[in-house]
Image (spheres, rainbow, N blue to C red):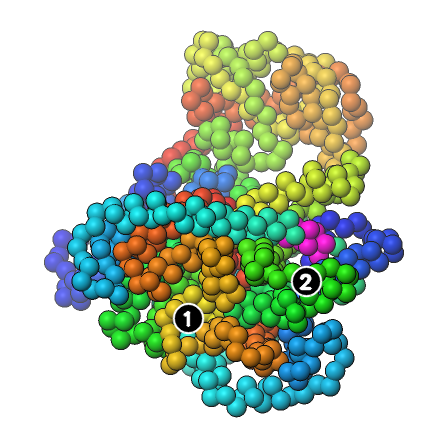
């Protein structure tokens, strides 16, 4: 092959190289990924940076004369605010209450719906329906139609049985909110756990049966351990979403009475959009972000492990 | 039809090299089988030839033309995948016509070519069905049909029979072999099943750990394995291997001491050294049972297959050999038997696994296997 | 549907017991929705009656009243625009990304995917202030456009994730076969991948619509009279101006019904989407 390449051959060689270069997937994937990545990056960085910035500023929209660097004043104010312990406690009550209800009832309902019974498919649809109702509707339906101390359904049930009707939002506001939010999230847990149950290897159950396990034993030693991982996933995901509960509080109690139902999220909302204390609200926001990140860390790790499977 | 040449083909994923320098020529109209255990690199090699994987180093020539950088569909090759990879949402006919459609072939001609291929494979009545409605064997044939329609220069098969049950496998094996004869097509066929390799190939390429162990015709590999790996990989039941030590004998023969079990005299060309550690390979059909003999053992298991009987004889703890006996033999478990070995069929392997002596007079060709 | 915990054939007693338990649970959970549905057809007087009426004279006047109020139509339209708009935009952004990650994975693909998922985990309240101010200063406050943007961003990680997981289910060999047949990347995508992934894309779109429709944080805080969708519209009923339960129920029924149906249709995909595949 000593003769110089003919024009055709050199063109062919050049285009072959170009083809090889173009075939390198990295170039192409970059262009494909760019829009989604760029957009999410902006979404992450810009508002977060602004929140951080505001949190160290004196900035109140009601009084533009107040301005300037505040250092850690906002944080100090937040952390020494007498209302903070109550708010944190409320957040924990809300989270804890709903998580407990979801996991317990979710598991029971999942096991129940896994059994064979008449009209199981339709029953399942009815059980998961609440998850798809928008939070504003569910809040109002519960507040008015069910929990109203005079005309509500519960009031009638109570008085018919000889009890006094409960004025939910005055006497037991947190319990009321936990009930409403649980009603929406139990179906979520049920659906997830039911899916997980149905992935339980039949052969494992049959082997356990041959060993003599029945009913409760089966539940305790085979089913619950299998559900441990999905339950942890449910807990983590619900935590992320429960930290953001807002509409239900807004519509029913507005955070009250007093601060009885003010959670961290609601406090920030109040500071930001009602008191227009941008600095203070941002400090609270940073706190909320830190908390969410802690949970997110564990959730991402679990998801990562699943991606490898 | 095409002639393919692989020159120094290498493949690395990052720092891991999975194909370590392969030289090979596939001649026109030849049916070449790549065989080897899982992970030996045979599928990777096939995919490099197809263009689905990039060749890290080396040159691939089709009819003398370098194709390393050519797109898969421009190499003139057609591939039949292990999972058939049929398009589930298209009918059988559309599946087979897809490549032609992409190439802009007019509809009338497409239909004609699909009909021709369908006739060869007896798929005519299935042309309107979707793959999901077909059985495994039928889907297999559609996959082959899809390849035939493209009138490629060479066919590539990637373990096409692994997803079929045993009886269907035998049937399809015959069909593929018949197809090869009818079309006269250059074919490269990848499998892990040495039976498929032995029955279908013109030549077999035995791969292991990314290198070629031996290239040859089935009978060459069977009777004259180049090393321990090929000897034990090809042939079922496996060739018996016993550790031994060489002892000098007269010219043209070696005395092989089976480490305490007895001695056999093997006619050799090159003398063995005194005390040289060896492996002795002898195929089950070259051992026979006798009342007594220089080597003895007790029968552990007897398998009656109908056309043959296999006796597993324990010579010593940890040293069991397989013996093929006549189907009407009355050997029983527990019998103490003597073994007669057909000395001319013995293979001797050195410490490094390479064959020192094989029965046929042709010397084995080991790693470099380019038949010019 | 495997029956993980049931025996081979339940005894009639067990079957009966389970039926009772199962339906009790179902009716209890569904009761608030049922009650709302019922109240939508009552006259206002009947709606607040004590004891609550199970039998009454049904009427459609509430639905008519709701229809008559211009606000309702406007809010419904806003909901539709925001849900469908954000779904379309999100899908357009997500499709190429999911395609790239599923079929051309690199060493960083997994990290990228996890990072995208983590953006969903950021609490909305954490960026309420800057977004409110940004929207205010760019004139996006109380506009459908602004809400479409925010909702798209909020749902994008889920859409990417779901499309990715559906794409991964398409056997790679089929795409390779099309490569061997001569399909260019766009043809591989349009002629082979899309038809196979279409059901998955459809469920993803439905899930996105559901999530956008029910989103109550941004839609309440970043809107006023113009762009407020149904979530905000219903929220405005929360100040107790007279008794209007029947109309509230009617409005709520209309707002909830379509999403309920979508939700029932996408149950299984929902599990995949909302647990990011951590539960199969």
Q: Nearer the viewer, mark 1 or mark 2?
A: 2
Q: Position of residue B122 (x, y in %)?
A: 61, 68
Q: Which mark is residue A165?
A: 2
Q: Position of residue C230 (x, y in %)?
A: 48, 76
Q: Is residue A121 left or right of residue A97?
A: right
Q: Is residue C86 above or below residue A72?
A: below
Is residue A107 on the magenta stretch?
yes
Q: Which mark is residue A210?
A: none
Nearest to the observer: residue A9 or residue B247: A9
Q: Is residue C132 left or right of residue C77?
A: left
* SS under mark 2: loop
Q: Look at the image and tell me whether residue C145 can be seen.
A: yes
Q: Is residue B144 above or below residue B329?
A: below
Q: Residues within 10 Å of mark 1 (few under 14, many from 20)?
A: many
* Protein chain holding label 1: C
Pointer 1 residue: C219
> What residue do we see at 37% from left, 41% from top?
B19
Quadrant in which the C terminus of chain B appears: top left
Q: Position of residue A204 (x, y in %)?
A: 70, 42
| Residue A170 in which image quadrant | bottom right
Nearest to the observer: residue A137 or residue A74: A74
What is the total number of numbered labels drawn onto the structure image? 2
Q: Position of residue B188 (x, y in %)?
A: 45, 52
| Residue C116 in which image quadrant | bottom left
Q: Main secondary structure of the magenta part?
A: helix
Residue range highlighted in magenta: A106-113
> What residue do we see at 64% from left, 49% from top?
A104
* SS under mark 1: helix
- Residue found at the far left of this picture: A4
Q: Residues within 10 Å of mark 2 (few under 14, many from 20)?
A: some
Q: Is residue B208 left or right of residue B141?
A: left
């Amino acid at each position: 092959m000593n003769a110089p390449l003919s024009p055709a051959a050199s063109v062919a060689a050049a285009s072959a190289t170009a083809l090889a270069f173009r075939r390198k997937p990295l170039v192409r994937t970059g262009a494909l990924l760019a829009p989604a990545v760029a957009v999410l990056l902006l979404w992450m960085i810009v508002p977060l940076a602004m929140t951080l910035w505001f949190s160290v500023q004196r900035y109140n929209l009601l009084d533009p004369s107040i301005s300037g660097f505040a250092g850690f004043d906002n944080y100090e104010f937040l952390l020494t605010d007498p209302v903070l312990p109550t708010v944190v406690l409320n957040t924990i009550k809300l989270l804890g209450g709903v998580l407990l209800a979801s996991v317990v009832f979710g598991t029971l309902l999942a096991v129940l719906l896994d059994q064979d019974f008449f009209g199981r498919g339709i029953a399942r649809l009815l059980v998961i329906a609440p998850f798809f109702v928008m939070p504003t509707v569910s809040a109002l339906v519960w507040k008015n139609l069910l929990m109203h101390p005079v005309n509500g359904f519960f009031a009638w049930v109570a008085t018919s049985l000889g009890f006094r009707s409960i004025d939910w939002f005055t006497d037991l506001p947190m319990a009321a909110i936990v009930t409403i939010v649980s009603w929406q999230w139990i179906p979520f847990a049920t659906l997830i756990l039911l899916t997980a149950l149905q992935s339980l290897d039949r052969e494992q159950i049959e082997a356990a049966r041959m060993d003599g396990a029945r009913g409760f034993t089966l539940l305790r030693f085979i089913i619950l351990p299998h559900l441990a991982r999905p339950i942890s996933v449910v807990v983590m995901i619900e935590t992320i979403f429960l930290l953001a509960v807002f509409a239900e509080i807004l519509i029913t109690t507005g955070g009250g009475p007093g601060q009885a139902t003010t959670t961290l999220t609601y406090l920030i909302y109040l500071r930001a959009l009602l008191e227009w204390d941008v600095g203070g609200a941002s400090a609270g926001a940073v706190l909320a972000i830190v908390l969410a990140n802690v949970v997110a860390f564990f959730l991402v790790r679990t998801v990562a492990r699943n991606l490898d499977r | 039809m095409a002639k393919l040449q692989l020159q120094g083909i290498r493949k690395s994923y990052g720092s891991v090299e999975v194909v370590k320098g392969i030289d090979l020529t596939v001649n026109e109209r030849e049916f070449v089988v790549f065989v080897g255990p899982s992970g030996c690199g045979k599928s990777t090699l096939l995919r490099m030839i197809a263009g689905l994987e990039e060749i890290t180093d080396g040159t691939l020539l089709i009819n003398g033309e370098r194709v390393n950088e050519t797109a898969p569909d421009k190499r003139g090759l057609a591939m039949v995948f292990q999972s058939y990879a049929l398009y589930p949402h298209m009918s059988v006919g559309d599946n087979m016509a897809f490549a032609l459609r992409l190439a802009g072939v007019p509809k009338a001609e497409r239909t004609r070519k699909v009909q021709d291929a369908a006739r060869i494979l007896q798929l005519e009545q299935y042309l309107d069905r979707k793959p999901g409605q077909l059985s495994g064997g039928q889907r297999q044939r559609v996959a082959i049909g899809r390849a035939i329609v493209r009138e490629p220069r060479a066919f590539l098969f990637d373990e096409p029979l692994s997803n079929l049950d045993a009886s269907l496998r035998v049937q399809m094996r015959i069909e593929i072999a018949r197809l090869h004869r009818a079309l006269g097509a250059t074919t490269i066929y990848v499998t892990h099943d040495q039976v498929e390799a032995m029955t279908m190939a013109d030549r077999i390429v035995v791969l292991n750990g990314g290198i070629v162990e031996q290239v040859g015709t089935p009978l060459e590999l069977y009777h004259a394995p180049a090393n321990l790996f090929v000897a034990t990989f090809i042939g079922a039941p496996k060739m018996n291997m016993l550790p031994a030590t060489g002892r000098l004998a007269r010219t043209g023969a070696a005395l092989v001491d089976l480490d305490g079990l007895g001695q056999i005299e093997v006619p050799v060309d090159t003398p063995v050294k005194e005390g040289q550690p060896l492996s002795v390979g002898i195929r089950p059909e070259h051992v026979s049972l006798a009342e007594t003999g220089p080597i003895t053992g007790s029968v552990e298991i007897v398998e009656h297959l109908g056309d043959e009987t296999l006796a597993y004889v324990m010579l010593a703890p940890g040293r069991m050999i397989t013996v093929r006996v006549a189907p009407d033999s009355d050997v029983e478990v527990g019998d103490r038997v003597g073994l007669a070995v057909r000395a001319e069929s013995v293979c001797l392997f050195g410490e490094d696994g390479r064959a020192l002596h094989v029965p046929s007079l042709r010397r084995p060709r080991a790693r470099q296997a380019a038949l010019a | 549907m495997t029956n993980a915990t049931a025996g081979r054939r339940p005894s009639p007693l067990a079957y009966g017991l389970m039926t009772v338990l199962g339906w009790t649970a179902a009716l209890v959970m569904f009761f608030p929705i049922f009650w709302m549905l019922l109240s939508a057809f009552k006259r206002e007087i009947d709606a607040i009656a004590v004891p609550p009426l199970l039998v009454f004279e049904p009427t459609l006047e509430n639905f008519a009243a709701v229809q008559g109020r211009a606000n309702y139509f406007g809010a419904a339209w806003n909901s539709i625009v925001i849900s469908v708009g954000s779904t379309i935009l999100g899908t357009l952004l997500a499709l190429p990304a999911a395609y790239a990650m599923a079929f051309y994975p690199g060493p960083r693909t997994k990290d990228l995917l996890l990072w995208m998922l983590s953006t969903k985990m950021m609490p909305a309240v954490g960026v309420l202030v800057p977004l409110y101010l940004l929207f205010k200063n760019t004139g996006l406050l109380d506009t459908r456009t602004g809400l479409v943007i925010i909702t798209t961003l909020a749902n994008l990680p889920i859409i990417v994730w779901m499309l990715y997981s559906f794409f991964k289910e398409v056997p790679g060999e089929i795409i390779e076969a099309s490569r061997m047949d001569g399909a260019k990347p766009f043809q591989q995508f349009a002629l082979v991948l899309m038809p196979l992934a279409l059901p998955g894309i459809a469920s993803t779109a439905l899930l996105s619509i559901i999530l956008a429709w029910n989103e109550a944080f941004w839609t309440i805080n970043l809107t006023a009279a113009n762009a407020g969708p149904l979530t905000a519209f219903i929220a405005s009923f929360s100040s107790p101006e007279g008794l209007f339960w029947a109309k509230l129920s009617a409005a709520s029924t209309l707002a909830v019904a379509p999403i309920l149906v979508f939700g029932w249709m996408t149950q299984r995909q929902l599990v995949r989407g909302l647990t990011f595949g951590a539960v199969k």
